[in-house]
Image: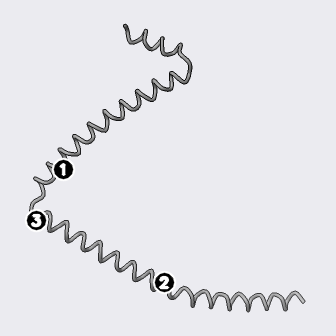
Amino acid sequence: MDVFEKIEQIRKKPEHIRRRYALVCVVISMVFVFVIWMMSLKSSFNDSEKVLDDESRLQIMSGLEEVKDIKDDVSSSYGEYQSGQGSIDEESAKDDSQEEKQLFNLSQ
């Protein structure tokens, strides 16, 4: 049976049957892609383990420590920002109430 004949037979079938064919084709294709991806991932992990020597690992660890320091700095800065935010809100509320009083007095 020719591939084009099979496609024509499938085209003549009801829509729910054609959807099943499409679903089966998609699943088979995705399994194929997944298997290839897993094989390439496995080989890349094997290659990366061979490439990393002690010096590279030390560089990576120092980079991670720097990232941790940056994270700590950002966390502390955010905490300081939040603690100072309350006083800023109170000051702006006082300024707003004074402006409202002045506008109210002007309108009378």
Q: Nearer the viewer, mark 1 or mark 2?
A: 1
The total number of labels drawn is: 3
Camera-side residue of 48 and 91: 48
Helix, strand or loop at mark 3 = helix
Q: CA distance from mark 3 to mark 1?
A: 18 Å
Helix, strand or loop at mark 2 = helix
Above-or-below relation of 49 to 80? above
Give the mark, 1 or 2, whose residue is nearer the N terminus: 1
Instruction: Identify the residue under disc 2.
Output: 81
Residue 103 falls in which quadrant of the image?
bottom right
In this picture, residue 68 sits left or right of residue 88: left
Q: Residue at x 36, y 30 (%)?
A: 28
Q: Where residue 5 appears, x then y in whole percent?
A: 43, 9
Q: Where residue 42 appears, x then y in whole percent?
A: 20, 45
Camera-side residue of 48 and 30: 30
The residue type indicated by label 3 comes to Glu
Q: Nearer the viewer, mark 3 or mark 1?
A: 1
The residue type indicated by label 2 comes to Tyr
Residue 45 — which label?
1
Instruction: Identify the residue under disc 3.
Output: 55
Above-or-below relation of 12 to 77? above
The residue type indicated by label 1 comes to Phe
Q: In what quadrant of the picture does the C terminus appear?
A: bottom right
Q: How dense is the environment of label 2, judged by Cα within 10 Å: few (below 14), some, or many (20 and up)?
A: few
Give the mark, 3 or 1, whose residue is nearer the N terminus: 1
Give the mark, 3 or 2, whose residue is nearer the N terminus: 3
Q: Residue at x 19, y 66 (%)?
A: 60
Q: How dense is the environment of label 1, judged by Cα within 10 Å: few (below 14), some, or many (20 and up)?
A: few
